[in-house]
Image (cartoon, helix red, strand yellow):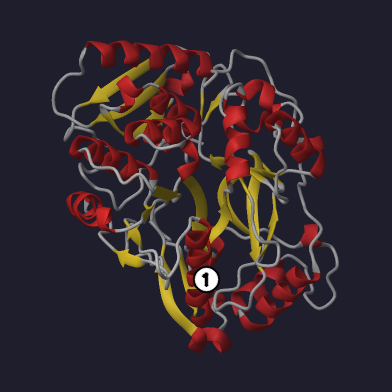
Amino acid sequence: MTVSDGRTPHGPAAMAVPVAPAPGAAWTALRRAAERAPAYRDLLARAGVDPAAAGDWGAVPVVSRRDVFVAADGWIARESLTAAAEIVCSSGQSGPPFALGLSGRGADAAMRARVDGLLSALGARPDSPSLLVNALPMGIAVPSDLATCATPSVHPEMALHVLTEVAPAFDRVLLVAEPLFLAELARRWRAAGRVHPETWMVTGGEPVAEAWRGYLCGILGLDRHRVMISMGAAELGLHLLHEVPELAAARAVAAADPVAAADGTWGALCGGAYAPALLTFDPERLHVETPEGPDGPRLVMTVLDDVPLPLVRYDLGDAALLLDDDAVGVLEERCGLPLPRPVVALAGRAARVRSAAGRPVRPEAVRELLFADPALADGLTGRFRLRAPDGGAVLECHLEARDRGAPDVSAEAALRKLEDALRRLGGVPTRVVRHASGAYPFHAEGDWTHKPRYTDPAGGGA
């Protein structure tokens, strides 16, 4: 990864679609939600929006998690409640009020079709046995009619047992898990020495660093194209934004020089420190837009289907840009491949810290640095806490080690390189603190269910 040296990429305005024109299906979703969800009808009234007569999509209020889940019952479309098959819980990372989703009875069939479509693309057939290993937390279902499903969740010993002792009997393996758990599983899998050559992985749940992909595939001896990103949200559904091989290739090219790649594409979105994930979506399922917020463009979605929890212009709390056709064309020229439309450049969560030098530092930039150096990544869980105490005069990065001892010489040198890189990002003195396993103060040891918090509001998080 190239660490920003202070050069400023061109701004994003000319290459983004800040408020995409709303299709008729989005207006239908709005009016249906206003009719069925009393809390949403009240919110529109307070904003002065008449759902029957409104014609300016930009005047429709953007809805936050707190708007909805302080009193979620008023947002549920009761006419659709009998069609709700499942309550999908969020990770709870942001604390109360906790977000959740209501999955309709048709959602399982739709998700099953998406999963089987992916397996078919990987070569799965009824006469060629495939194994799907679902290592996601909290009972998240990944249904399939085409594969045999194992559900070890975030139990690393059981997941490793399935991958080493059961998987060799199958022609291919599709492993679904969140990034940090996948990294830990991969290290253990490497030590066991039995990696199925036809292994494919789907990951998401939190931002995915391009350096993480390279690190993971290096551990397992797999080509990088075997790892795919899928982004979902409990409130809206699984597999909302997803990667295809061409977009993964475009991101790899961009990651080689993030400052140059930002010119004519996503501009200042990532500060030139890293390349965002490049994802696409189904415009018949979602209306996606990236309006400008107080801290930059944010990812806003409207589900177009008739669902029990109808959310219109829902802010997911991510920094992103919906790229216009010219920006996608620039990416195509650079990577030499035709790319699908639409494309969202997803920079990660909106949370960041700001140093006294006035530079915002995103956790995603730190994540790229951690996984870019295998000597560093091998000894860390990947959890960290980025803080800017003393008004941002110092930038702190606290790391969780995988072992209880001191790092070896090569890891010590990698820690100092990380410190130097963070100093260049923040423009202020930097302190990197490595906490031995069991002593990390920000996350329970061995807890793969809860997502880490990477910034500390009390220490300069924004």
The image shows residue 3, relative to residue 275, as above or below, that is above
Residue 82 visible, this orientation: yes
In the picture, measured across the screen, residue 141 lies left or right of residue 43, that is: left
Of residues 33 and 5, the one drawn nearer to the viewer in this rendering:
5
Question: Which residue is painted at 39% across and 51% down in the image?
Answer: 93
The image shows residue 112, relative to residue 224, as above or below, that is below
Question: Which residue sits furthest left?
Answer: 405
In the picture, measured across the screen, residue 413 lies left or right of residue 56, that is: left
Instruction: Name the residue beneath numbered marker 1.
Output: 113
Residue 71 visible, this orientation: no
Mark 1 neighbour class, 10 Å CA radius: few under 14, some 14 to 19, many 20 or more: some
Question: Which residue is painted at 71% across and 72% down in the image?
Answer: 30
Question: Which residue sits furthest front?
Answer: 127
Give the percent coordinates (x, y) of residue 374.
Answer: 34, 23
Please identify the quarter of the rendering in which residue 439 is found: top left
Q: Circle 1 — which element?
A: helix
Give the percent coordinates (x, y) of residue 128.
Answer: 39, 64
Of residues 167 and 143, the one drawn nearer to the viewer in this rendering:
167
The image shows residue 404, relative to residue 63, as above or below, that is above
